[in-house]
Image (spheres, rainbow, N blue to C red):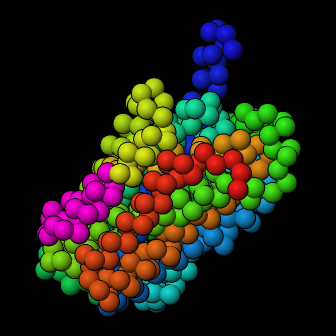
Amino acid sequence: MTPATAPAKTQNYVGPLLIIGALFFVFGFVTWVNSVLITFFKQAFSLTSFQSTLVAFAFFISYTIMAIPSSAVLKRTGFKNGMSLGLVTMAIGTLIFVPAAKSVSYPLFLVGLFIIGIGLTVLQTASNPYATILGPRESAAQRISFLGIANKLAGICSQFIFGGLLLSGANEVINAASLEKVVTPYLILTGILIVLAGLIRFSNLPEVSEEQDDVPTDTTAIHTSVWQFPNLVLGVLALFCYVGAEVITGDLIISYGHAIGFSNDEAKNFTTYTLIGLLAGYMLGIIMIPRFITQQNALRYGMILALLLTMGALVTDGFASVLCIALMGFAISPTWPAIWPLALNRLGKFTKLASALLIMGISGGALLPLLHGYLTDTVSPKAAYALLLPLFGFILYYAVSGHKKTSW
């Protein structure tokens, strides 16, 4: 590539990346509101910690169920139409919140969350490899960090809007009658998703294919199965650990604060602290990767810090313990951007299927919070955070040596 043609290539993917960034803002908003819903539903329906984490389970388990079908859908529709379909599916899920509130039905809310998750599965299966393939692989973590900033800014907005709407009022009792509060915002959200689906459908977003992945033709020719790539399989497990840890540190921190004595008015801001940490980490990643640090080294140092902060959360009390959990947001921020390019490295024709498997790893956000909720109910809210130690430990292994494996 000559200096004259380099800017043209950059120009080619900046526009599409901005469109994908807008999508990440939308489903970041929808995803991070779960932290408020977990605490709100726990009080409105008088749930145990385990029962309240079914919010995360219903939302994230759809990734496991729908990841492979989503890959098949994308083969038929392409990335752009698949994204539009995902947005419409999400709109159906948000609309279900209205009859769920009217009928005071926790199971129906969970159905709505599951359908939202299905739509997000399609979006994630399309958008993450899209961002990876769209430009040079060595800066893929930088592009995914940009998308992460959009996602976390949306999460902060969701905390202010839904936290203020559902958890404000120090003396207000949250009960079944409070469920009416979700109707208007979710109707508005439904309308926004439908409009965005139309805009994406008729946009000039270019189609990309796996063939644009920078892979020698003989590399994937010797592989007959996606399971023959250790960097992918271990990457799926690392992503499973990461998403579970992110939900535990982000979505459950409000419930943790409430359990150790903070009021709703105080605890409603705790997820925002985690999101600010994630946001700061993503911004630092854009500046540092790959100019000053490789994506795998950023992942390695982040996991070491996360392990130290976990120990800090376990040995301190009150706000100091909460702050250690919130700061994990900064520590884990390199994880998602780094795992994707490391796991998809040299996958070639297997990229879409590999992406679907990575999306299945998001089921960590469904299963691990349930285990955390069980430990909260049976041991203690603080001791439950010891679950993070083996999760961060495995991701550290992947950062140090797991991603380098080329054969079993």
- Quarter of the image for the C terminus: give it: bottom right
Q: Is residue 279 above or below residue 204?
A: below
Left or right: where 344 falls relative to 362:
right
Please name the residue shown 55% across and 69% down the image. 363
Looking at the magenta stretch, what is its main secondary structure?
Answer: helix
Magenta stretch bounds: 305-327
Q: Is residue 340 above or below residue 393?
A: above
Q: How many marks?
A: 0
Q: Quadrant of residue 2?
A: top right
Please name the residue shown 77% across and 50% down the image. 350
Q: Quadrant of residue 121?
A: bottom right
In this view, the residue in front, 28 or 143, is: 143
Answer yes or no: is residue 248 visible: yes
Left or right: where 257 falls relative to 300:
left
Is residue 312 rendered magenta in the image?
A: yes
In this view, the residue in front, 84 or 339, is: 339
In this view, the residue in front, 96 or 334, is: 334
Q: Position of residue 393 (x, y in %)?
A: 43, 60
- Quarter of the image for the N terminus: give it: top right
Please name the residue shown 75% across and 55% down the image. 228
Q: Position of residue 32 (x, y in %)?
A: 41, 62
Is residue 81 rendered magenta in the image?
A: no
Left or right: where 87 falls relative to 49:
right
Q: Position of residue 21 (x, y in %)?
A: 51, 43
In this view, the residue in front, 2 or 76, is: 2
Q: Is residue 176 above or below residue 289?
A: below
Q: Position of residue 309 (x, y in %)?
A: 27, 58
Answer yes or no: is residue 127 visible: no
Please name the residue shown 86% across and 44% down the image. 221
